[in-house]
Image: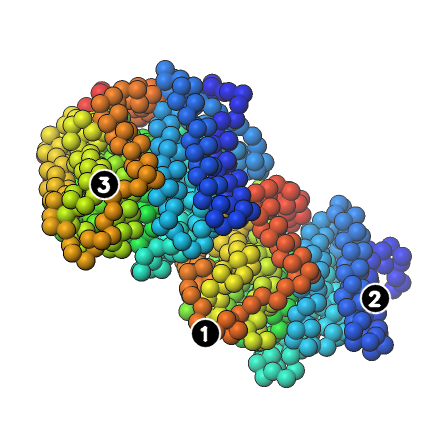
Amino acid sequence: MNHTTSFPWLTLIVFFPLLGAVLCFLVKAESSRWVALGVTVCTFLFSLPLWWLFDSSTAQMQFVEQASWISSPPVRYSLGMDGISFPLVLMTTFLMPFCVTVSWTAIEKRVPLFMSMLLVMETAMLGVFVALDFVLFYVFWEAMLIPMYLLIGVWGGPNRLYAAIKFFLYTLAGSVLLLVAILALYFQGGQTFDILELSRGTYGATLQMWLFLAFFAAFAVKVPMFPFHTWLPDAHVEAPTAGSVILASVLLKMGTYGFLRFTLPMLPDATVAFTKPMIALSIVAIIYGAYMALAQADIKKLIAYSSVSHMGFVTLGIFVLNIQGIEGAVMQMVNHGITTGGLFLCVGIIYERTHSRQIADNTGLAGPMPRYALFLMIFALSSLGLPGTNSFVGEFLVLAGTFVWSQFATALAALGVILAAAYILWLMQRVVFGTPAAAHRAHLLDLNARETATLVPLIVLVFVLGIFPNPLLSRMHASVTQLLNGQKAPAYATVSPPTPLVPPAHATMAAVQPTSSSEQAATR
Amino acid sequence: MSISLQDLLAILPELIVIGAACLVLALDPILETAKKDVLAWLTLGALAMCIGVTSSQMTGRTYAFSNMVIIDAYAAFWKLLLYIVTGLTVLLSLAYLKAERLSIGEYYGFILLALAGMMVMVSGADLLTIYLGTELMSLSLYVMAGLKRTEARSLEASAKYFVLGAFSSGILLYGISLLYGLAGSTRLSAIAEAITMQGTSNPILSLALVLLAVGFGFKLAVVPFHMWTPDVYQGAPTSVTAFMAVASKAASFGAFLRVFVEGLGAASADWSVLFTIICLATLALGNLVAIVQTSIKRMLAYSSIAHAGYALIGVVVAGGHRGNGAGGGFASVLLYIAIYSFMTLGAFALIGMLRKEGQESENIEDYAGLAKREPLAAFFMLVFLVSLAGIPPTAGFIGKFYIFMAAVNGGMTWLAVVAVIFAAISAFYYLRIVMVMYMREPEGTVASQSRLETSPALSFVLACALAGVVLLGLFPNGLWSLATHAAPLLK
């Protein structure tokens, strides 16, 4: 049984921004900024009551809405939220107003189009997180491509055309296979597109393997997992600030959300079978991303590679298949959204002043811009996982979960944390404490009120989630537990003799016994 | 043989259209040039009457003229679609003909004659009736392609279309004669009986199948019989191109399915293999060659080839998979072509009215910065292109969704995988136009840049096409139930 409420909260939250997107064209070009701000703030306010209305004792879908959409085949307009999607929805509605304020003066041309594209994005992103019908999910998932393509391509940097088409084709190529997988599931899973019903079904081992690969193509590109990450640095660097924030904070989470919502519950056997390669790819992403970040001269590119590394922690947490790992992964998704979002906002603010994202052009900001330097420092320390900040909680939980799975893997992943400290502190050393570049001296004004108001709420959240993570963790607990319960039964049933379809274990993983690890995972 | 009143009533829509065509041709020399718009309204009036008559023929199955003609839901589906696209073509031609200074009376007359041919094609129950309809349609289109008499490219298009079209008609006729030799009749039902009795091992039957496939392949513009398409689509006046790309393709699919399901259904295992190969070649070539085009009309020509490939998936699946799944396959073809018609017509309507220094501007580069000069037109184009690429929530997605669904249901998941990969590739060339419109700065002076020449009729056409693309994307229920109701059944 689903918890239903009479008021259509989710429809309101999802489609209110779309209304605003239309409104942006109907008002004067100058006013469209205020429309976008008003709409995003209202959407956030509408989503705020859910924090208290949310029942954290149950793993069932809440705020469920059901209506028929396509009668044959039965595609339903069904929305709902559980402990996994709940933090992501709130994070999205929370971040969008800052995407508007940071673009206030940075976007000068075609403002109404820009603002409406931001709002369309918000609708699509929220829709992805609350859709309970697989086709509806796919519609939101794909509908997001066009506005994002325009955001990067119209308002982006010098190399924007290349970055925009690369982003589009990469993500589209990944997700079209998802469509075929959805259709295959429909015919194998009792002629339904209902995500919950499909999750209850059991599927043959071979089918699961194929479906896993198709899901992987869609979600791994979005996360992005190594080696499908190459679109990310291009897209991040060329996108306007708001686009980078949306990309890093929300878009990447859709991939990991997809793993949690679809891959784990629907394909439990394949998940277990693919655990090792997935964890190997995650660890490669963690170390490789961090290592690449060390070498970057462009601040945005550095943060982009750090995202690859941080998202590696998320996928690592998901695929160790225990409660700490997955709760840590969801925490890390939210935290990465806030921290990296904050970092991109900071880069956008300095770019508006110096018109350069090169580290060499933006040195020694502590002197002329003390307030900015302080905020940047807080986000940076959060990014490297300093205890007391939000990221520490997520990374700690993920590493704790990994420790249960394999100590060796934990040691490798922890290497990523050390490298993060290296590239972040080195970045801070140059940007905050270096000698100011003479050329830009005159432009280095400290934050104005609008910019301060953009960053302060994020700073507050960095500490609140760092010090009191429990309110959020407790809201996801029931759902994560249920996710793992569904995982347990089939994992025991089929895993004992490794099927020939399993790719050879990664060299570094060879020491770990396949059965004992999954038993550990299952018994946690 | 006497003609009964029942027979005449059965073909009432055809009679109306032919009558209107004669009236238009007769009035043309009498009317003053300024008043020739009357002919367009006359044409639209005839179409409105036809819609009324055909809507009442949606149920049951009536034969007329000693089983030469059949009136059923399947024929009605195609006819209604043809009326709508013909009506929209006429509306978009109003302004286009004036801008291009083309002779008006002949134009509407030929549109109506072509339409009559198409209607005969989709309601033919005899290979000869269908052949006659095909010829009537083709001959009218040959002339229409060459209507820009002063332009070499238009004449070349007409000549090329005529030579290749005549060639393909010959092949079609040869296939028909072989089938007549086999069955002793050209009736589809008699042919079906003969094949069921004689079995499918006869090599003459295989040869006839191939010849019919080649003949229809030309009309459908599928690879490797597509050579004429890019040149003709580029050279013909744009309103004619729109008509060819949409109406002629729809009618050809209608006749093609009728022949292969009702006449050659017993040999479906054979022809579905044949069409699998054609389908794969069409998807690959259409989508890949479209990438390198610099003319938007040529690009859309290749895109229309590729779309025929997607529709063929439904045919292949239904042919290889009898029973319930077959219905889903054919219905998805009907749905796909209907949706394809709206988005393609919308795109061509915009292309026809985009002018640069008084000339049609068909170079993709001429679209640079269009979003700044004509934000609304650019947005319309964006929606049509996104729909052609099959990205939700547009109708193009719904069309592909049902096609892929039929493929997966019919156990041809691999074909669906191939098709979605080509769909992802197709996004590249559609988005290139979006990129040029939205992200490129125009070159040269303002006066030398392309502009959209709008008129109320054109706005209406665009609004209809946009409504079709958006509403069918959001609420596909009605069209889908219509398509499943109309789809033929493989016995």
Frontmost residue, A133 versus B470: B470
- On the same chain, marks 1 and 2? The answer is yes
Give the residue number, with chain letter if any, for mark 2. Answer: B19
Q: Secondary structure at mark 3?
A: helix
> In this rendering, would B186 be left or right of A57?
right
Q: How crowded is the residue under tag 3: few (<14 C-alpha within 10 Å), some, or many (20+)?
A: many
Looking at this rendering, what residue extends furthest in the top direction? A57
**Amino acid tagged 1:** Gly
Give the residue number, with chain letter if any, for mark 1. Answer: B444
**Amino acid tagged 3:** Tyr
How far apart are the alpha carbons under marks 3 and 2?
79 Å
Residue at horizontal 61 percent and vertical 63 percent from the top: B349
How far apart are the alpha carbons under marks 1 and 2?
50 Å
Which label lies toward us, 3 or 2?
A: 3
Name the disc covering residue A56, or none. Answer: none
Give the residue number, with chain letter if any, for mark 3. Answer: A372
Residue at horizontal 52 percent and vertical 26 percent from the top: A8
**Amino acid tagged 2:** Gly
Q: Secondary structure at mark 2?
A: helix
Residue at horizontal 48 percent and vertical 73 percent from the top: B445
Q: Position of residue B236 (x, y in %)?
A: 60, 74
Which is more N-terminal, label 2 or label 1?
2
